[in-house]
Amino acid sequence: MRAGIAVLAAILLACLLAPLYASRVSGTDPFRSNVNGTAFGTEVLAENTVGLGLGVTPIGPTWRGAYLLGADTQGRDVAARLLYGGRTSLLIAGCATALCLVLAALLGVLSGFVGGAVDTVLAGLLDLLWAFPVYLLAISLSIVLISQDLRIGLLQLTADSLALPVLILGVVYVPYVARPIRAQVLALRRAEFIEAAHATGGAPLHILRRHILPQIWPGLIGFAPVVMAMALLTEAALSVLSIGVQAPAASWGTLIADGQALIYTRPMVAIAPGLAVLATVLALNVVGEAWRASLETRR
Amino acid sequence: MITRLLRSVLVMLGISILVFLIFFATPGADPAARLAGRGASAEALAAVRHEYGLDRSLPVQYGLLMHRLFITGDLTSQVNRGQRVVPAVLRAAPVTLSLAAGAAVIWLLAGLAIGLLAAAREGSGWDRAVTALGLVGISIPVFWLGEVVNLLTQSRLHDSWAFRWVPPLGYQPLLQDPAGWARGLVLPWITLALLYAGVYGRVLRSSLIEAYRQDYIRTARAKGISEARVLLRHALRNALVVVVALFGLDIGALIGGGTLLTEVVFGLRGIGKLTYDALQNLDLPVVMAAVLYASFFVVLANAVVDAVQAALDPRQR
């Protein structure tokens, strides 16, 4: 668990603080092409006269301060794009996770605590979403939202807004969290100490806040790393399908997609962001696993 | 059995309504403009409105769409005018099914093998390696893994003895060329199976260990039957219930996601590649058809898995 947290913290810091130091480790601005092949006024043309001499910018990895991971075909520094792409990916996955947990907690508690017709409808909806394969739901939502700007009243979402992937990823994993929460609330409602609280005249809201929510918290938090891991992977998948993050913004997913055509000539373009996703998701899963194990021993 | 089928039908109905609402009733946007594609002329918009009955009520639109998708099958692509969508999806289905079925067989067998070994040597280095493999498997972006496999097998190392047998990317039909079919799919199969084999090994391991702690195993041993029989008839049979349940959950992720990305990276022209191309061109009728057919397939496959599970576990009958 500690190793997982350490890796996560390192990746988070490296990416989030990128604007502070990226100019020092990279050759170019992450979004500006550099086809004439200079960095900081020095020529970097000489790098790839051997081997696959395509283009004029270096093929990674190189062992100099600039272009550590080489450049893509437009001469953009892969290391810089990796760091900035990481910011996008982490931001989207983080916000989507927060949205998902809030929605799931609301729906799960509402459904389990109110019961009756409300529960029937909500539980049915959750079951339906659960049976709908996540990626297919995400594809349907994305293609519709991306093919046309959305206007609802004052709210306007353009196709290249980062809020779109956040919204989509936040929604598709709701049943994954809400169903267990609902089951937990249902079980708690029948527990003796809750019945006792009802019998002694406790108001429903008071019971909810004092007795039920504290029991829900640890499990809900335990879902955070797992949902964020899935959100990162799904964001990457949607971006590969060109319905996630839209250019010119870049995320680890779009970098992996860019790298597909370059995999034989400039392998670093795809390998580096893939490794970044792998390391981050793995660390999240390790943390999630450890949290769940600690919950189980506590019981 | 009847209730299970009925529930599957209900779920399919629900999913089709949901998809319909997403594509045709998203607030604040005009479905005709979306279906006709960017920069469509006024005539094109009018034609789409007429074709999909967009000036009529939502239930009528829904009925019309379902009729065209599942009965007449005459929904046509917006980008390749005149290309019928449903036959295209059905033509691509064998590729996707070949990929998914082969990968599932490999990961189930591999999961069984490593799970049995890990359970036999609980706490050993091998046991921990299986745990690690499971965690890494669920953390790999499958598209990226496919790219790395391609880099290893199609690039400079292609001429080495290890990868000389690897054919160029693509799909050979099973009935025309069975050997070529298998050879072309081996790497995609392994790529997909790598994601899941570790998890299945782990799940099988823990449920085997759990099963061995139960009373019925002690009873079985007390009856004097052999260890092999205890394992196969009692412990494994019970442990498999969990594996089958997990498999049911993963069919959705496999057909809806895993094969989609694997097909794209390995150039297999299945439903995933069809969907991918349609997404690039914003060809919404194709996306709708692919999504609906794929999710219906997942729902039906889940019903089958449920039946298998009930056969294995009398408590669920």
Image: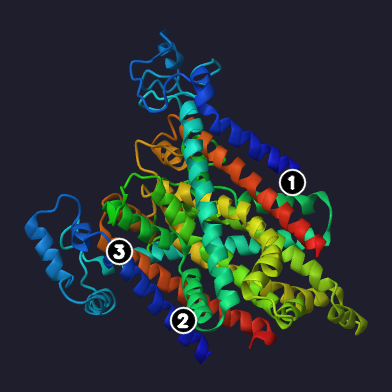
Tell which subunit mark 3 falls on.
B
* Secondary structure at numbered mark 3: loop
**Residue at the image point whose x is 51% and y is 81% from the top:** A120
Q: Separation of disc 1 and disc 3 at Cα? A: 43 Å
Left or right: where B237 falls relative to A168: right
Q: Is residue B264 above or below residue A173?
A: above
Q: Earlier in the sequence, mark 2 or mark 3?
A: 2
Left or right: where B63 falls relative to A274: left
Residues behind callouts 2 and 3 on a single chain: yes
Q: Which is closer to the viewer, label 1 or label 2? A: 1
Q: Is residue B191 above or below residue A88?
A: below
Other residues around mark 2 within 10 Å, as few (<14) / some (14–19) / many (≥20): some
Three-letter code for the amino acid on which mark 3 is drawn? Thr
Q: Separation of disc 2 and disc 3 at Cα? A: 26 Å
Q: Is residue B224 above or below residue A41?
A: below
Q: Position of residue B125 (x, y in %)?
A: 81, 49
Q: Position of residue A146 (x, y in %)?
A: 31, 51
**Residue at the image point whose x is 77% and y is 68% from the top:** B208
Left or right: where B242 falls relative to B29: right
Choose between B308 and A296: the one closer to the eye.
Answer: A296
The residue to which callout 1 is attached is A1
Three-letter code for the amino acid on which mark 1 is drawn? Met
The residue to which callout 2 is attached is B8
The image's mark for residue B26 is 3
